[in-house]
Amino acid sequence: MSLMRQVWLLVLGVVLASLIGSVTVSTGSVRQVLQTQLQLKNADNAAALALALSQQGGDAQLMELLISAQFDSGAYQSVLWRQADGKLAFERHAEPRPSEAPAWFIGLMPIVVQPGLAQVSNGWNAIGSVEVRSQSSYAYDELWRSSLRNAALLAVVGLIAGVLALFVLRRIRRPLDSAVKQAQSVVDGSYAMVEVSRVPELRRLTEAMNAMVQRVRGMFEAQSEQLQVLRMQAHADLLTGMSTRKHFLAELDSALTRDEGPAEAGLVLVRLRDLAGLNQRLGRVAVDQVLVTIAHAVKVYPERVNGCLGGRLNGADFALWLPAPDVARETAQALAEALRSSLPAFGSGIQVALGAVDLPRDRPLGAWLGMADTALARAETQPGFTVEAIATRASVDLENQGERAWRVQIVEAIKERRGRLVPYPVLDREGQVLHLECPLQLQLQPQGPYEPAARWLPLAIRSRLTAEVDALAVALALEAIAKDGQARCINIAPGSLLDGGFVARLRELVFQSPPAARRLSLELAEGAAVEHFELLQEMGRQLRPLGVKLGLEHAGAGLAQVERLYQAGLDYVKLDASVVTGISGDAARAAFVRGMLIMLRSLALKVYAEGVADAMDVQAVWDCELDGVTGPWATARRNGPPR
Amino acid sequence: MLFTVRPLPRIRRAFARRVGALAFGALLATAMPAQGLDNDKLMEAAAKLGPRAVAEVPPLLQMIGRAAALDEEARVTLVNNYLNQRIAFREDTEVWGVIDYWATPLEALNKGAGDCEDYAIAKYFSLLSAGMPIAKLRMVYVRASLRGQSLAHMVLAYYAQPGADPLILDNLIPDVRPASQRPDLRPVFSFNSEGLWQGTGIVTQGDPVARLSLWRNLLQKARAEGF
């Protein structure tokens, strides 16, 4: 039984006991008073009657008349005159008037009254005695009524006391609940602060808890600072602080190959022309300043737009990937304008060429770089700050069919549950399957092929259908888990979090199959944690108590931006391919991964590596002691490529 | 409030006392516990009242023990004579400082004095202790004519049979005489402790009823003294 319930029961018991006690006591004393009064009445009336009878000179008729008169004018049950030899001389008797008090009450509180007895004489002659018995029903009535009155009054008092107690208990309960909640949240891996209680006993508890949370925060912040340093060493160019070529390409590859993302995107290459000549003319220091200026102009985009990538490809080349269609040219022009106004300050003859391409995201990395190089080469043929752009029309059907038709197809597919989950294993060091990553494929046309998310997800996002899609995927996953007991993980689009009823729907689904729920994981892209932190937290609060695990995928440098990661309440993190690719040959990258691992482990999170293709990298992952690995290598290791 | 007159002649009373003391001394060894009397309680109550009361208890017990062995009429006479000797007539105002006071037998014996109802009370309880049924005894309010004066007075009447001519135990005329031979007394009202005395739990210490009338109050005190 909970503490509060015990206290509440105690209060209730005390109130009830005092109520019953005081009603009993007061009823008892009223009974005593009534009994005494009745007794006195009997005795006194008997004496008075006997006195009157003794003055009648033994005239029986007169005496009977007197007895009748007394009986008729008073509230008597019986008045009788017994002769000296014990024989009944005269009696007046009335049926006892029924009382309004219930029989059980009379049985419980009997009013026992002796009849009044007095001697009657005629001169020296003793002629017997009178016995007077009064009606007692009115006493019961009075006793009953007073008991009811008392009970009602005390019930009101008890009620008030109960309400007051409830109020006070609630006051006590609030800080207690918040302390318990905080403790629970610590267990769940979300380190929340609570308001310090004003109750002295609880204050010390909450203060201690808050201090502990504060310390965890401090540790976390220290670790993430250290991580930042490691990241700079591993991924960043020393001069400009931008991603190195290697890291940029890994990031870009990861962005191009993942399911979610825009159908089309843009890439801008920026080149400081004639680097060698500038070095000679202006000196290294000035040229470095020029490069830093360019880097600053480019960096603005990744810093402000989630999913936007920037990098320094080599000495004079910068790259900017924009996760949006039809913005590459404008961005390149805006960059050119900005550089045109700022660079001449460092010296004359500084020229910058910019090449911009718009391409469907499903084109391979090589195609992107080739096209962008072509555009850049064209720009270099002209002097000054020039921009050249190449736009490739996006995939035909998407354009032709029109959004409306797509939307209908997606909605239909969801309605008819024409979807399937394609399993990709996440393996641990021993090669055991930890869980299956299950991206959803939809059969957009009846009897048509199942199509991967990359084809329909951008449109689903634009049409705000992701919540439906994700709910379908979760439902399918729960069914599959119920069938084979294999743990599965479903990727939730960040957009779904914005749908107000989404989490409630998931809750409902999960409620229907509690055993399966314990083997279900839901994961969101790192960006979701940055942008919709509160919603993510809420989702965890709603679903994790039911056994559902919650994770972040594609986690990389952005993880450091999640300021309150320690409050998120997560179970695991999957490190993005861009972070783990190539760690086997690069000590700095491996160090960064290790740093992340230490930080995440301190929050009691499991850490997996995503998109690992190279066996050497896998070995490096195990060396770093990550918990699991997924990607082409894992898939191939298990059972060849998925169906 | 009752007024009685004419105390016993002083000489006669002193003589009676001396004779009584002798008789008690002789009989002390063969004393029997009186019927319905709690001796221990009586001694305890006497000890509280004073040395005189303590001294009065053994002869009283002797007398009651002796009376219990006699027939009723002789018993009445013995008790009447004994108590008429042991108690001198004095007004309540003198003895107790109040206008009317109903003393228990021990209180009356302790003072060695009392007025008419104190005699009647002492005789009543002594007779009860000697095994007399309550129904045969009545305290009677009477109007006494004494030398042409009317007085409110109280006597104890003994009824050998219901409705019979009672014997009167009085202190004005110390002899026990039938009521028919007492033209000086006119009965007004009689009472006894029937229905009160025998009743269980009615006369208890905390019962407010008990303290309301002189008679009931007295009954309670007498019970406390062991009667």
Image (cartoon, helix red, strand yellow):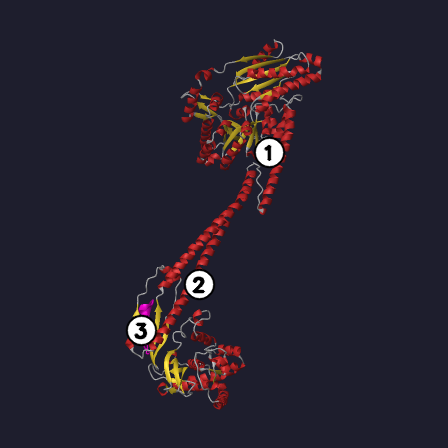
Q: Is residue A403 magenta?
A: no
Q: Looking at this view, is A200 or A4 the one in front?
A: A200
Between label 1 and label 3, give the one nearer the viewer: 3
Q: Is residue A75 magenta?
A: yes
| Residue A473 percent across, percent down from the top left | 46, 28
Find numbered disc 3 in the image and state the secondary structure of the residue it sits on: helix
Q: Looking at this view, is A473 or A48 the one in front?
A: A48
Q: Which residues are magenta?
A: A68-86
Q: Looking at this view, is A214 or A430 the one in front?
A: A214
Query: Looking at the image, is mark 3 or mark 2 earlier in the sequence?
Result: 2
Residue holding disc 1: A601
Residue B69, picture quadrant: bottom left
Residue holding disc 2: A29
The CA span between labels 2 and 1 is: 73 Å
Residue B158 located left or right of residue A7: left
Amino acid type, residue under disc 2 in the picture: Ser
The chain to which mark 1 is attached is A
Q: Is residue A587 visible?
A: no
From this view, report whether residue A611 is shown above or below residue A114.
above
| Residue A235 percent across, percent down from the top left | 63, 23
Residue A57 located left or right of residue A143: left
The CA span between labels 1 and 3 is: 107 Å
Q: Do pointers 2 and 1 mark residues of a single chain?
A: yes
Residue holding disc 3: A66
